[in-house]
Amino acid sequence: MVDFTLTDEQKNLRELAHDFAEKEIRPVAWEYDKDGTWPEDVFRKAHEVGLMNTHVPEAYGGPELSYLDGCLIEEELSWGCSGITTSLGANGLASAPVILAGSEEIKKRYLGMLVEELTYASFCLTEPGAGSDVSSMRTRAVRKGDKYVINGQKCFITNGTYADWYTVYAKTDPDAGHRGISAFVVPRDETVVIDKKEDKMGQRASNTATVTFNDTEIPADHILGEENQGFKIAMMTLDRTRPGVAAMATGIARAALEYATAYSKERVQFGVPIAMHQAIQFMIADMATKVHLSRLATWQSAVLLDNGMGNTIESSHAKRFAADSAMEVTTDAVQVYGGYGFIKEYPVEKLMRDAKIMQLYEGTSQIQRLVIARETLLPRRVEQPQAAATA
Ligand code: CAA
């Protein structure tokens, strides 16, 4: 049976996240956007009320929420501010590979750290020369006795400046293409250098930095899974986290729709509120349809995971559609506001800037289409091991 009814627990969770977004995020979101400063206070409160690390299994002290639960939370928080939500949710992305492939000892130590107190972790995949084409990465990990030594540079790393540990992908067999990549947990030490905090168009409250590993030594048992399994671990991670990004895009689009709807009822032109004009009504209708379909695709891609099934194509459908829709809906919201929409004093300008990254990070809209095309032409349903969500 297909049933979109949320349980009472899920409704409560959504309400908790919405209240948090309304009281703790929205009132400060525009200030943090302007300054591009780090909203530590917001994260501290989110950690206290249990809105961070929601994916961590109970065995390691977390609440082990489902993927759908994670998406409910992310839509609400992102409705408040997607920049703050990106940083707030980044622990989920960094720790998904640990949950998937880490040893018991590593899970206890590093997932436990995130739950116990407010600490941060970052996912280090992208490099200056290796974005969409993951397997062309150049970071190296060389085994020396009971250690690995890591050298290389990762860029566009969410929370890179503040992370206490990093999930790092590096070549262990440089001649083997995607089959020569391994994944590691790397605790921060003095050999990890934060080179650059990016000054971004949108999501300015989230931290994005370049992280360089200079002869960084880690114990050999900090590898995730077997040597040279890293590419698949990365792909399985992204299958798990793309529904959350789609949920965030839905939250941005919903916020834009709400602002545009309210404004269209107030703004009078040609003697009536502009909402009375069919030109505006049709824009509002298309915006509402996009929000609705984004949410449906997001929920389905999450529920498949919750049921232990593969969701590669569905998470790409959801991420691609919701991201492109967020860009379209926020652009239309600016249009509904007319000239005022272009002014920073009004809320939709920020939403349009924030929406752009949705089409870029965790796989561009073009990469999602590539995955969708491949899975359509040559279907390959990967059964996923049951694991917790990544909000
Ligand atoms: N699950 C399990 N295995 C998978 C898989 C999946 N979803 N997708 C691919 N694989 C396996 C394939 O079966 C294949 O296995 P074999 O070695 O047995 O043949 C192997 O992985 C290689 O697959 P492909 O041939 O499809 O690999 P490719 O090099 O053509 O790349 C790609 C595919 C989809 C383009 C991939 O590189 C990709 O997703 N690129 C986008 C990267 C991305 O999303 N980066 C985001 C960085 S994180 C971020 O943005 C967050 C932040 O902090 C800002």
Image (cartoon, rainbow, N blue to C red):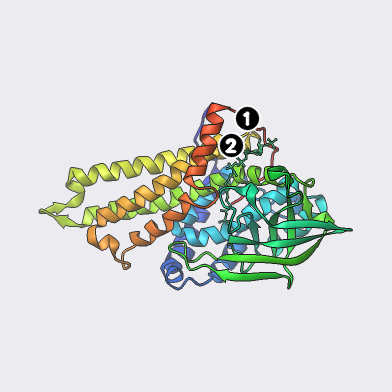
Looking at the rendered structure, the secondary structure element under dot 2 is: helix
Residue nearest the observer in this picture, 77 or 371: 371
Mark toward the start of the polypeptide (1 vs 2): 2
Query: Quadrant of the rendered structure where residue 186 is?
Result: bottom right
User: Which is nearer the eye, 93 or 272?
Assistant: 93
Task: Identify the mark at residue 381; answer none if there is no mark.
Answer: 1
Q: Residue 39: give its label.
A: none
Q: Which residue is mark 2?
A: 312
Answer with the quadrant where ligand 1 appears in the image: top right
Q: Answer yes or no: do the residues labelled 1 and 2 have beta carbons within 8 Å?
A: yes
Kindly tell me whether residue 181 is visible in this rendering: no
Does residue 152 appear left or right of residue 1 in this picture?
right
C-alpha gap between disc 1 and disc 2: 8 Å
Q: Is mark 2 within 8 Å of ligand 1?
A: yes
Give the residue type that dot 1 points to. Answer: Arg
Image: 376 above or below 350: above
48 lies above or below 378: below
